Amino acid sequence: MTKDCVALDDVELSDMADLTSATVGWEVGQLGKQADEWVLVSQAAKSGKLKGFMFTTLERIGGTPAMVIGLASVARDRSSAATMRAIMHEQYHRALMAFPDEDVLVSGRMLQPGGLTALEKLVDVRPSERVKANGEERAWGRRLSKRYGALQFDDRSMVARGDGDVLVVDHCPTGHAAAAEPFSACDVDAGDYVIAWGWAMAEFLEKFGTD
């Protein structure tokens, strides 16, 4: 289910806070402030219990269609991968409706490589251990760091420094590999995170034409 962030009520915010209590520990007040910062919220539930959520905004960055993920969290259980896929299905449907016949940049802030599963099946996902970022990709990193309000940013590693709030894609699929570069270089206590992104091509988005 996806709706405007301004339509979230106190019960929903409380359920989100409960979901994240064992991981990133976002509190109701903090989530309420984030609801003011982002436009859309998608929620996934099973048997009436919240299993995951994501705040996003669909916008153009320098004229390029973009889906900017503000923050997200998925329950760490056996269904975590399926929950993330369901949430991203919603996001891609919305992106298709907003930007028909266009390629869309999808970005998020990450603390661990498990978060990158939100970007699976996208094209040219960065950062990558196997491929060094070229000039245009480093430029995209700088643009996204400004969008996220990073206090510092390294356009080679894609590691940014924020204000200490851990506002990331909180997802750690069962059996996922331990953190590797550039994630292992992040100083979480200092507010570090990795800016990651990939491209949802127009032909890929066509698969999400129905809810």
Image (cartoon, rainbow, N blue to C red):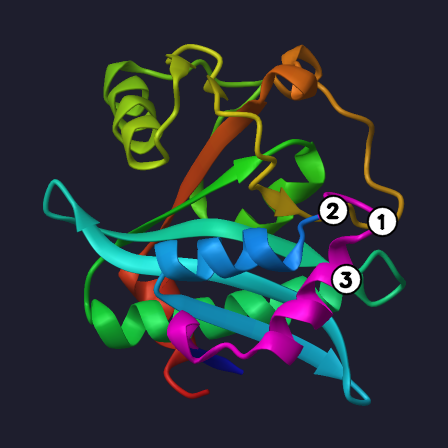
Mark 1 near mark 2, Cβ–Cβ under 8 Å? yes
Three-letter code, disc 2: Gly
Q: In the visual, does 197 lie left or right of 141?
A: right
Amino acid type, residue under disc 1 in the picture = Ala
Which residue range is magenta in the image? Answer: 4-25
According to the image, label 3 marks what residue?
19
Lower sequence index among marks 2 and 3: 3
Whether residue 181 can be seen here: no
Where residue 52 is drawn, which disc sits there?
none
* Separation (CA) of disc 2 from disc 3: 8 Å
Q: Position of residue 57 (x, y in %)?
A: 34, 59
Instruction: Residue at 48% x, 74% y: name it.
Output: 90
Residue at position x 32%, y 33% in the image: 144
Residue that mark 2 sits on:
25
| Residue beneath disc 1 | 22
Q: Residue at x 34, y 25 (%)?
A: 141
State the predominant SS element of the stretch in magenta.
Answer: helix
Residue 185's quadrant in the figure?
top right
Q: Is residue 12 in the magenta section?
A: yes
Label 2, secondary structure: give it. loop
